[in-house]
Image (cartoon, rainbow, N blue to C red):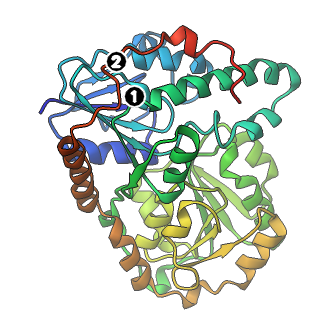
């Protein structure tokens, strides 16, 4: 089969990009498509492949500037010429699932999450903006919902990265999906001896508002314990202002450094509602426990009382109490590593091949061979909320 893999954007290396790298290993001869691409931002990890982009590439957006182009991405992704492929495999957390497969082709979408700012994070996003911004952004996100729902009806088969995402796909798009957990490069991590561990906790990920790292920082300000924040993003300046003297920021670091830090920390702290949470698997692969909000996909990947602990409310005082009462020294690193081993790349490849085989054998098409409504109609102001 001729295979095309479509990804939202390739500007940096996050969890979704690591899943994409695993997909390209499972289908090494697939052609790679994306709305925009920054070789430097992705650490040249896709330099050995031909990456097809859209008209937005002429603007040379980066991870810091691409959000300004938000209204244009549906147009861009629909402009990709995917004729001649037998299988279109989209890796989508925003708009890649809106790619239009050619007549007779199968479109399978691996969904990291329906576009959060149009669906589950819409109200929080608008509430954080001023009146003038809300007046512009509100109708745009409502129009995006309209386009997003119609795009979802033209995908032949959805695969969700967790039960949380599966439920959102059902709730927002009225589509069903099987769950295939994302691949994690667990072989990059290994526990260290107890005497090699250090006295600090760790937060790892993109510094975005929905990650709620402000709660983590406030909790550690109260505790007076050491916290290392690894990652970068739009919230960086705000979080630096919140941080007390026991909190430090490492920015983006290499994979090797992440593995070293995770193995040496006391625990990874997660305050976001993660759809899956690759960082939590990485921490456990390094033999360290996870202290996490009891919500979302992380409930499926952390064993409470064995490989970590959950807290119930996004409140700094509550989180500080849970951290203070958690004995990380009592956690068995081997138990953490055993749990993480369930999420290796080989298992992901086997499950994804099975999903595609099932879709091919089913012989059904969701309707992408039918004519789709013009995008200008779907993105027009709508009463849809």
Rendered residue at 59%/17% (across/down): 71
The quarter of the displayed image where residue 223 is located: bottom right
Image spot of residue 213 (x, y percent): 70, 54
Dividing the image into 4 quarters, which one contains the C terminus? top right
Rendered residue at 72%/20% (across/down): 139
- Residue 348 seen: yes
Specify few, some or many for label 2: CA neighbours under 10 Å numbering under 14, 14-19, or 20 or more: few
Dividing the image into 4 quarters, which one contains the N terminus? top left
Residues 41 and 257: in front is 41
Secondary element at tag 2: loop
Rendered residue at 51%/33% (across/down): 94
CA separation in Å, label 1 and label 2: 9 Å
Image spot of residue 196 (x, y percent): 47, 80
Nearer mark to the viewer, of 1 and 2: 2
Residue 256 marker: none
Give the residue at mark 2. Answer: 370
Give the residue at the far right of this rendering: 131
Disc 1 + disc 2, Cβ < 8 Å: yes
Give the residue at mark 1. Answer: 154
- Residue 128 seen: no
Image spot of residue 138 (x, y percent): 75, 24
Specify few, some or many for label 1: CA neighbours under 10 Å numbering under 14, 14-19, or 20 or more: many
The quarter of the displayed image where residue 204 is located: bottom right
Q: In the rendered view, does 177 fall on the left or right side of 33? A: right
Give the residue at the far left of this rendering: 1
């Amino acid at each position: 089969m001729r295979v095309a893999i479509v990804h939202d954007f390739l500007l940096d290396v996050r969890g979704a990009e690591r899943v994409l790298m695993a997909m390209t290993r499972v289908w090494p001869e697939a052609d790679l498509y994306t709305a925009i691409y920054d070789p430097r931002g992705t650490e040249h990890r896709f330099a050995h492949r031909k990456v097809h982009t859209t008209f937005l590439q002429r603007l040379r957006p980066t991870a810091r500037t691409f959000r300004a182009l938000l209204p244009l991405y549906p147009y861009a992704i629909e402009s990709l010429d995917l004729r001649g492929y037998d299988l279109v495999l989209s890796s989508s957390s925003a708009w890649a699932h809106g790619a239009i497969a050619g007549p007779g082709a199968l479109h399978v979408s691996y969904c990291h999450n329906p576009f959060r700012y149009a669906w589950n994070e819409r109200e929080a996003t608008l509430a954080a903006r001023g009146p003038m911004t809300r007046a512009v952004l509100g109708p745009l996100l409502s129009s995006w919902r309209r386009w997003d729902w119609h795009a979802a009806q033209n995908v032949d088969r959805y695969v969700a990265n967790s039960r949380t995402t599966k439920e959102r796909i059902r709730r927002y798009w009225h589509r069903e999906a099987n769950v295939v957990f994302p691949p994690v490069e667990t072989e990059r991590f290994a526990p260290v001896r107890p005497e090699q561990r250090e006295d600090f906790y760790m937060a790892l990920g993109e510094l975005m508002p929905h990650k709620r790292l402000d709660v983590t920082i406030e909790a550690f300000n109260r505790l007076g314990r050491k916290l290392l924040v690894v990652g970068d993003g739009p919230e960086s300046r705000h979080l630096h202002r919140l941080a007390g003297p026991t909190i430090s920021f490492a920015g983006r670091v290499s994979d090797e450094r992440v593995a070293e830090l995770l193995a040496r920390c006391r625990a990874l702290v997660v305050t976001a509602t993660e759809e899956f949470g690759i960082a939590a698997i990485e921490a456990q692969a390094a033999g360290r426990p996870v202290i996490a909000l009891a919500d979302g996909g992380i409930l499926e990947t952390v064993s409470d009382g064995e490989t970590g602990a959950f807290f119930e409310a996004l409140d700094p005082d509550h989180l500080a109490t849970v951290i203070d009462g958690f004995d990380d020294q009592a956690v068995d690193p081997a138990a953490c590593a055993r749990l993480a081993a369930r999420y290796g790349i080989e298992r992901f490849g086997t499950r994804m091949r099975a999903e595609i085989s099932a879709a091919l054998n089913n012989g059904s098409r969701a309707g992408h061979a039918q004519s789709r409504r013009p995008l200008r109609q779907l993105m027009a102001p709508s009463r849809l909320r």
